[in-house]
Amino acid sequence: MAEHQQKARPETGARNPLVQRAWGALVDGLGAVGSLLIVALMLVICADVLSRNIMGSSLPLVSELGALMVVMIVYLQLATTIRHNRLARADIFYSGFREKHPRKGAALGALFDLAGVWMIGVMALATLDMLTRDIGANQFIGITGVMTLPTWPFRAAILAGMAIGGLQFIFQLLGALRIVIQGPQHDRA
């Protein structure tokens, strides 16, 4: 069934297999970076727990770093979640509907992708505003004199994840519109 979903929702609007593979590598690569950051965050939290139990005090930056990293991980993995059709939706209806009515199913998918582009666009504008404020105000997390980190690299990674997720929605929207206009083409690869 997952194989059918992959074919029913094109990865990109591009017909060039090299472009599709390169885009897939970028999207899945960001997802892998997000997974590695989960491991790093777990190690930081474990080190903090050990520090609290052994030395009686917490490590600096753990709570602030954890908060920013969780959000960064979500957005770095967003595009791969979209690409592999793992976003939450009522698939019990959508899958059957798409099989029985390919063009109408593609139109419904296009509406879903359009809503995704719009939502990510709204969030990206807000994040861009925060990023420019962080850079302009030279914003840091942590305790001055103990340990600090600038916040802008985290915000930039979040914004990059949103932009790539938005592009993935656009590519899927174009592929769905192609099915709506031309009809499903089962004989093509």
Image (spheres, rainbow, N blue to C red):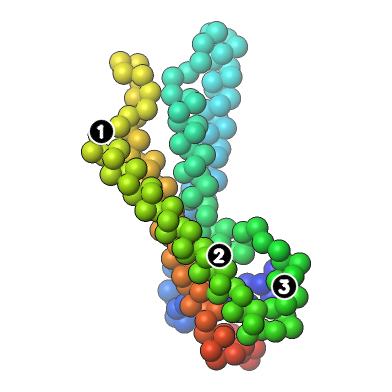
| Residue closest to the eye, 96 or 160 | 96
Q: Amino acid at mark 3?
A: Ser
Q: Is 128 drawn above or below residue 20 in the view shown?
A: above
- Residue reaching furthest left? 136
Q: Is residue 107 left or right of residue 156?
A: right
In the picture of the structure, the residue carrying the numbered disc 2 is 83
Foreground mark, 2 or 1? 1
Which quadrant holds the N terminus? bottom right
The quadrant in which residue 110 appears is bottom right
User: Where does label 3 land, which residue?
Assistant: 95
Whole-Å distance between the Cαs marked 2 and 1? 35 Å
User: Which residue is found at the position 55% from the left and 8% from the top?
Assistant: 56
Q: With respect to residue 182, does 132 lie above or below?
A: above
Residue in view at x 39 percent, y 41 percent: 154
Could you tell me the amino acid type at mark 1?
Asn
| Secondary structure of the residue carrying numbered label 1 | loop
Looking at the picture, tell me which residue is in the foreground, 18 or 144: 144
Residue for badge 1 = 138
Q: Is residue 31 left or right of residue 152?
A: right
Tell me, yes or no, whether the two marked residues, 2 and 3, touch with CB atoms within 8 Å.
Answer: no
Q: Earlier in the sequence, mark 2 or mark 3?
A: 2
Looking at the figure, which quarter contains the C terminus?
bottom right
Judge whether residue 144 can be spotted in this image: yes
Q: Earlier in the sequence, mark 1 or mark 3?
A: 3
